[in-house]
């Protein structure tokens, strides 16, 4: 499906949802909240079907290359993010429909917070390098802070990858070269 069709489809489903939401909030109808969220769920189900098809296709066609592993991880994060979005919508509908029930708002928003954390991980490309740096540091055991700082400078690709990110301080690049000699 071309990108323009996906954009038009997304806008139409959002338009239907907002129209139904406005009618429900104006109290002109006594619709169930699950019915109001139906356009979003139809869109999510379509997106979920396309994502599952893409995941299965990628598993069959790609070998164990590093680039395919990274794209597969990204698609798994999209899958988990979509599942969290659907879970949040269901909990929100339950909270709105059955106000008298003892479902706390805190529990309703947990899937949304997980979704936001996944979004932050996807947004920053250097997050994977930082996580791997912390994992390597935890595997080496407890060392003094001075040995950890020189060890992170000597790693090479991880340290150079972090220094090349946007906003890296220029002095950190020059000081790294003095340690490597």
Image (cartoon, rainbow, N blue to C red):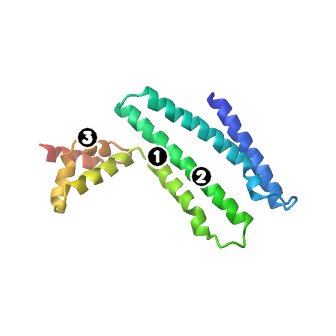
Quadrant that contains the C terminus? top left
Residue holding disc 1: 122
Checking the image for residue 157, the label placed there is: 3
- Which mark sits nearer the N-terminus, 3 or 1? 1
| Mark 1 Cα-neighbour bin, 10 Å: few <14, some 14–19, many ≥20 | some
Q: Which residue is drawn at the image coordinates 55% and 58% (left, top)?
A: 111
Instruction: State the image coordinates of residue 78 (x, y, percent, origin top left).
Output: 52, 44
Q: Which residue is drawn at the image coordinates 18% and 43% (left, top)?
A: 177
Q: Secondary structure at mark 3?
A: helix
In the picture, measured across the screen, residue 141 lies left or right of residue 97, that is left
Q: Are marks 1 and 2 in contact (CB under 8 Å)?
A: no
Picture layout, residue 65 above or below residue 92: above
Q: Residue furthest right?
A: 28
- Which mark sits nearer the N-terminus, 1 or 2? 2
In the picture, measured across the screen, residue 25 lies left or right of residue 167, that is right
Give whichever of 133, 89 is nearer the camera.
89
Quadrant that contains the N terminus? top right
Q: How many numbered dots are placed on residues in this image?
A: 3
Residue holding disc 2: 85
Q: Which residue is drawn at the image coordinates 75% and 58% (left, top)?
A: 33
Q: CA distance from mark 3 to mark 1?
A: 20 Å
Q: Secondary structure at mark 1?
A: helix
Q: CA distance from mark 1 to mark 2?
A: 15 Å
- Which mark sits nearer the N-terminus, 3 or 2? 2
Give whichever of 148, 99 is nearer the camera.
99
Of labels 1 and 2, the one closer to you: 2
Q: Secondary structure at mark 2?
A: helix
Of labels 3 and 2, the one closer to you: 2
Q: CA distance from mark 3 to mark 2?
A: 35 Å
Instruction: State the image coordinates of residue 16 (x, y, percent, origin top left).
Output: 77, 46
Checking the image for residue 110, the label placed there is: none
């Amino acid at each position: 499906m071309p990108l323009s069709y996906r954009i038009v489809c997304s806008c139409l489903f959002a338009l239907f949802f907002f129209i139904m939401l406005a009618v429900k909030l104006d109290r002109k109808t006594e619709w169930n909240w699950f019915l109001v969220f139906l356009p979003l769920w139809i869109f999510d189900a379509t997106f979920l079907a396309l994502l599952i098809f893409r995941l299965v296709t990628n598993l069959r066609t790609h070998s164990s290359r590093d680039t395919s592993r990274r794209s597969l991880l990204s698609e798994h994060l999209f899958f988990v993010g979509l599942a969290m979005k659907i879970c949040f919508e269901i909990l929100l509908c339950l909270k709105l429909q059955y106000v008298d029930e003892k479902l706390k708002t805190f529990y309703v928003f947990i899937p949304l917070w997980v979704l936001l954390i996944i979004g932050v991980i996807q947004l920053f490309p250097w997050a994977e390098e930082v996580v791997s740096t912390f994992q390597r540091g935890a595997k080496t055991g407890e060392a003094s802070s001075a040995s950890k700082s020189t060890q992170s400078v000597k790693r090479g690709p991880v340290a150079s990858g972090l220094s090349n990110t946007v906003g890296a301080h220029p002095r950190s690049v020059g000081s790294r070269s003095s340690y490597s000699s």
